[in-house]
Amino acid sequence: MDKIEKLKKVRNDIIKDYSGRDIKDTNIDTLVKDSKDLQYVIIKDIISETKDTKSFILIPDKSKGTDSLEPFKAGQYISLKMFIDEEYATRAYSLSSRPSLAKKGEYRITIKRVENGLVSNIMLDNMKVGDGLTISRPMGEFGYNEIRDEKNIIGIAGGSGITPFMAIAYSIIDKEIDANLTVFYSAKTKDDIIFRNEIESINKKSRKVKFVITLTREEADEYLYGHINKEMLEPYIKEFNTVLMCGPKTLYKTMNEILMEFDIPKKCVHYENFQVDYTPSEIKKYSLKVILKDDLVETTCKSDETLLVAMEKANIKAPSMCRVGICGYCRSILLEGNVKMIGSSMVKAMNENDYIHPCVSYPESDIVLRLDI
Ligand code: FES
């Protein structure tokens, strides 16, 4: 039976049975709810880091069955899952806490306001101590890998990209990682430095970790001035280095040009990436049919938003974690239609087998998608 015939059969079976039930009662919801990947937490404390950034201390919500928190490796993130005005949304946030604290039942995530950012602004403006949250287990490959990496780590951080480096720094201080770390952290002004007191304390106490802060919009005696450049890096580059970067994509581009001047091989440079950028030549609206186990949901999608976002707007709890085509968690089968996929060659290669990652797929026609769960 070819793909279309299979689809027709599935659709006919579904339509016969389709009762228009509330999506919240569908199988996907039950599956997501029962997944061991989820952890239920309570906000224990909220710390104001800068005028637009707050840290949230999270502890297990035992009343919902989360007795302890999953351990994490420095550099990993959790995916926060929320319902906002009937829309299901997930966002990835790096864990900024000391990894050893997870064993004692504590995580920290640090969130910076994003212009028009849905989840970040709800977190900053609406959430309070005692509120509950649903998060994934820790995920991601960003960070130090003792088999792959050199012991001289150069960190490059821009804005809220400093968050995973705090966890990496604490892992070195706590001797979980045997390496030296120098983090170059670019902030706009003194008041925009996240974790300023913590960084100063680490700089005073640790011989293995050093933060070098540079301000791009203000001159101050205790900090460097200007964007991270070759002269700043030069004293810290050794014969063998591993470079870890977390920040806006513009930073990656500039830094890659500088790293080439030091002859640092590309395989020694690793990135954390929570952004997907794509602008279609024109904005068009298409139909989107999503098959979820025994249900069919029909909605619409637009050429300037990913299929994952379109599904979330339709209140479909599509699986997702990283949202940038890395974790593979959202993998789905494209039964009909064409998409523009952004991302790694691994993600694009899967497309040849009709698998797509909705988090990095922009529709270019009407779409029929089957969630691969
Ligand atoms: S959510 Fe990770 S690949 Fe799509």
Image (tube, rainbow, N blue to C red):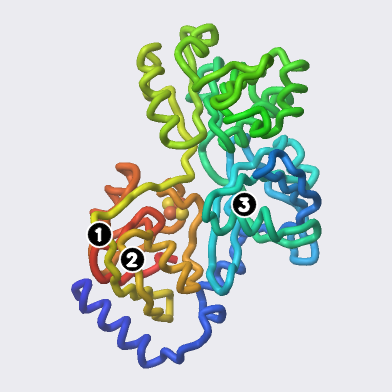
Side of 355 relative to 110 (left or right): left
Q: Residue 68: x, y in percent?
A: 76, 52
* Residue type at the position of mark 2: Lys
**Label 2 residue SS:** strand
Residue under pointer 2: 302
Residue closest to the eye, 304 or 63: 304
Q: CA distance from mark 3 to mark 1?
A: 38 Å
Query: Which comes sooner in the sequence, label 1 or label 2?
Result: 1
Q: CA distance from mark 2 to mark 3?
A: 31 Å
Few, some or many residues within 10 Å of mark 1 (<14, 14–19, 20+): few
Side of 38 relative to 44 (left or right): left
* Residue type at the position of mark 1: Glu
**Label 1 residue SS:** loop
Q: Nearer the viewer, mark 2 or mark 3?
A: 2
Q: Residue 223: x, y in percent?
A: 64, 17
Say which mark, if any, is on residue 268.
Answer: none
Q: Nearer the viewer, mark 1 or mark 2?
A: 1
* Residue type at the position of mark 3: Arg
Residue closest to the eye, 279 or 28: 279
Query: Which comes sooner in the sequence, label 2 or label 3?
Result: 3
Residue under pointer 3: 137
Few, some or many residues within 10 Å of mark 3 (<14, 14–19, 20+): many
Location of the C terminus (image quadrant): bottom left
